[in-house]
Every structure is written in C-alpha cells, then in structure tokens.
Amino acid sequence: MNFKEIHIGTLINQRVAECGIELSRICNFLNCSEDEVLKMYESQSIDSEILLKWCKLLEYDFFRIYTQHLILYAPASAVYTNAEKTENKKSVLPRFRKNIYTKEIIHFILEQIESGKMTKKETIERYSIPKTTLYKWISKHTD
C-alpha cells in the first residue's frame, strides 16, 4: 500500500469488488445514480461525509489510510506539542494520546532501513519515532 499517494476512489472500487456488493445496493445506500458512483471510483478525493457512508457500507475504515499518511509524512511537531504543554492551551477538539503504528507502517519503516534508503537516525528524525520504539521493532521483527 502506497500511503504517500492516496487515490481513494480506486481503493473504494477495490473494496467493492472484494465484498461483491451490487451497484444497485450502493446507489440505494448512497442515494445517488450509477454514474455518480462510477465518478467516485475515478476520484482521487471524496467528501468526508460520503467517505463515511462508504466506510459503513463496505465495513472498512478508509480514514485510517489518511491517518497512516499523516503518521509517515506529517508527524506531529515536537516544537508544537512542547509549546502547547507549557502554555496549557485547552482545545475543544479530542486529543489523541499517541500515534498508532500499524503493522503495515512498522513493515514500511523497517523496509526503508533494511534496503538502505534511510538510516535509523534519519528514520527517527523524519517520522518522529522514539529511538527505543524503533529498536524494539527491529529486535522483534528481524530474524
């Protein structure tokens, strides 16, 4: 899975094929025409409300794909989080404790190191992964 370049329409189409859901059922659930569904398959991005409906229909969390993108390519800035802690700013938005690293993310990161594309230090800096976490992954997932 390429988390850098996300084409959500293609991914939805693949999931529809896996589930074997008929186009008529999709149209009824989404309250749209067949042409609109086919256009969604070709769309690189989709409105979040419609994507939520797709998630429910296909019983798959497509939002996690975007979360994985954020973990890999836009990790939370240490400067921002430290400044926020010192100023004790309150937000009405939910605050998540930490990044969730899926096995796909761990595999991707370890592959970057094993292939020589990135060093351990570069990986730690780029993805803001704690050094101890990275070394645990290496010891756990390396033969």
Image (tube, rainbow, N blue to C red):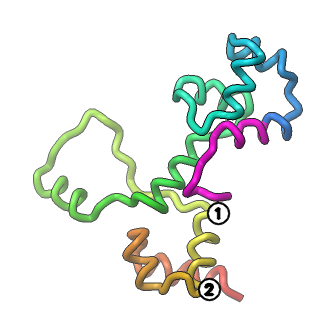
Residues at marks 1 and 2, CA–CA distance in whole angstroms? 15 Å
Relative depth, front residue between 76 and 9: 9
Based on the picture, tell me whether residue 5 belongs to the magenta stretch. yes
Under mark 2, the amino acid is Glu
Residue linked to disc 2: 114
Q: In the picture, residue 50 is in which quadrant?
A: top right
Q: Which residues are magenta?
A: 1-15
Q: Is residue 111 left or right of residue 57?
A: left
Label 2: few (<14), some (14–19) or many (≥20) C-alpha neighbours in 10 Å: some
Q: In the picture, residue 99 is in which quadrant?
A: bottom left
- Find residue 123 and report its horizontal and vertical position in percent: 46, 77
Under mark 1, the amino acid is Glu
- Find residue 18 and report its horizontal and vertical position in percent: 85, 40
Residue 123, relative to residue 102: is it above or below?
Answer: below
Residue 130, relative to residue 46: is it above or below?
Answer: below
Residue 48: give its label: none
Residue 104: give its label: 1
